[in-house]
Image (cartoon, rainbow, N blue to C red):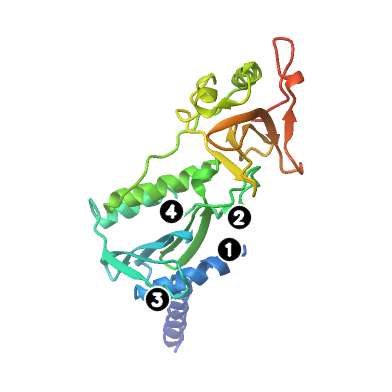
């Protein structure tokens, strides 16, 4: 009788263990992006014949990753690889970006090496551990246009999803890691990839040199001559710019000289122009999330040998 009861108890224990493996642990951010982005993702995945990954259950040896890029006016692209019962599959699918995914294309993906090697490489790039952008420390810069990247990953009985908006436009290490993950994936499945950004920010001394160069110029000046007069080739340093245009055509643009993800604030070179690539005015500005508008380094206080710039941060 004792052995019989022990056998029943052991069977119940095993049953509980098996049931536990059927329970999916879902790590889904509470940020509003989840609802809005998946309103575009779900119709596209459905067109591709894919069940919602976040709602699924899988044996412990199954794996899947889906990456989506777009969420703007240019449509939405999806990439999916999965291993089910030991068999790998891969596909690319895209639509016009509408919620109905009215224009749809799908094609097969094949790895350059093996799917197992690709999965291991993606894991090395942070596939399973990257944080969602919404959980990162606040940045001093927020781009208003571009594309977003959403990753869904399922391994064993754990599901995760995370999103990065315009990762190339931010300077924190997590965005660089996401770019490395994304570009590695594209390269290894034979898709077009792009070189990673290798930004070289300016030191305090180099910002002084830019300030001196600005002060010596006579305005208006052509944009070509303006940048020839600068002590650095900003493109060669892979520094990103952004800008704004008013209804009258008056516009400004900024080249960010220091890390925009630095919580201590960041420095930028702001130029003002009207049309025909003419720079009417230029100044050095300092941005901080605590400020309603950027601080302008006034020409009369431009640093010289006897003056110092305010602290730039890290």
Q: Quadrant of residue 88?
A: bottom left
Residue that mark 2 sits on: 134
Residue 125, relative to residue 106: is it above or below? above
**Which residue, as the protein is rendered here, is positioned at the far bottom?**
1
Residue 253 placement (x, y as % from top left): 59, 38
Residue 224, relative to residue 20: is it above or below? above
Kind of element beneath mark 4: loop
Q: Quadrant of residue 53?
A: bottom left
Kind of element beneath mark 3: helix
User: Which quadrant of the rendered structure holds the C terminus?
Assistant: top right
Kind of element beneath mark 2: helix
Residue closer to the observer: 153 or 246:
246
Number of the front mark, 3 or 4: 3
User: Which quadrant of the rendered structure holds the N terminus?
Assistant: bottom left
Query: Looking at the image, can residue 25 be seen?
Result: no
Residue 43 placement (x, y as % from top left): 44, 74
Q: Which sits earlier in the primary sequence, circle 1 or circle 4? A: 1
Tag 2 near tag 1, CB within 8 Å? yes
Q: Which sits earlier in the primary sequence, circle 1 or circle 3? A: 1
Residue that mark 4 sits on: 127
Residue that mark 1 sits on: 33
In the rendered view, does 36 fall on the left or right side of 211?
A: left
Q: CA distance from mark 1 to mark 4?
A: 19 Å
Q: Which sits earlier in the primary sequence, circle 2 or circle 3? A: 3
Residue 80 placement (x, y as % from top left): 35, 63
Kind of element beneath mark 1: helix
Q: CA distance from mark 3 to mark 4?
A: 24 Å
Q: Which residue is located at x 64 percent, y 28 percent?
A: 282
Q: Which mark is residue 46?
A: 3
Number of the front mark, 2 or 3: 3
């Amino acid at each position: 009788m004792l052995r019989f009861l022990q056998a029943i108890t052991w069977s119940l224990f095993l049953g509980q263990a098996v049931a536990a493996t059927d329970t999916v642990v879902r790590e889904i951010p509470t940020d509003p992006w989840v609802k809005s982005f998946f309103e575009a993702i779900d119709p596209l995945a459905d067109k591709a014949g894919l069940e919602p990954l976040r709602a699924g259950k899988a044996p412990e040896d199954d794996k899947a990753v889906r990456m989506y890029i777009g969420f703007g006016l240019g449509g939405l692209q999806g990439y999916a690889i999965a291993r089910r019962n030991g068999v790998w599959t891969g596909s690319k699918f895209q639509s016009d970006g509408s919620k109905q995914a009215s224009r749809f294309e799908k094609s097969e993906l094949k790895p350059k090496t093996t799917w197992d090697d690709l999965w291991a490489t993606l894991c090395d790039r942070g596939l399973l551990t990257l944080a969602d952008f919404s959980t990162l420390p606040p940045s001093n810069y927020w781009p208003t246009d571009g594309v977003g990247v959403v990753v869904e990953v399922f391994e064993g009985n754990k599901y995760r999803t995370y999103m990065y908006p315009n990762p190339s436009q931010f300077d924190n290490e997590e965005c660089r890691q996401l770019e490395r993950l994304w570009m590695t994936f594209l390269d290894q499945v034979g898709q077009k990839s792009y070189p990673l950004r290798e930004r070289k920010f300016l030191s305090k001394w180099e910002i002084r040199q830019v300030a001196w160069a600005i002060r010596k110029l006579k305005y208006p000046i052509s944009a070509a001559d303006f940048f020839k007069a600068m002590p650095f080739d900003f493109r060669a340093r892979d520094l990103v710019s952004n800008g704004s245009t008013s209804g009258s055509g008056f516009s400004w643009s900024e080249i960010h000289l220091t890390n925009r993800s630095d919580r201590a604030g960041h420095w930028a070179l702001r130029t003002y122009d009207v049309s025909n690539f003419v720079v009417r005015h230029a100044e050095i500005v300092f941005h901080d999330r605590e400020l309603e508008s950027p601080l302008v380094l006034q020409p009369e206080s431009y640093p010289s040998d006897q003056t110092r710039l305010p602290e730039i941060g890290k």
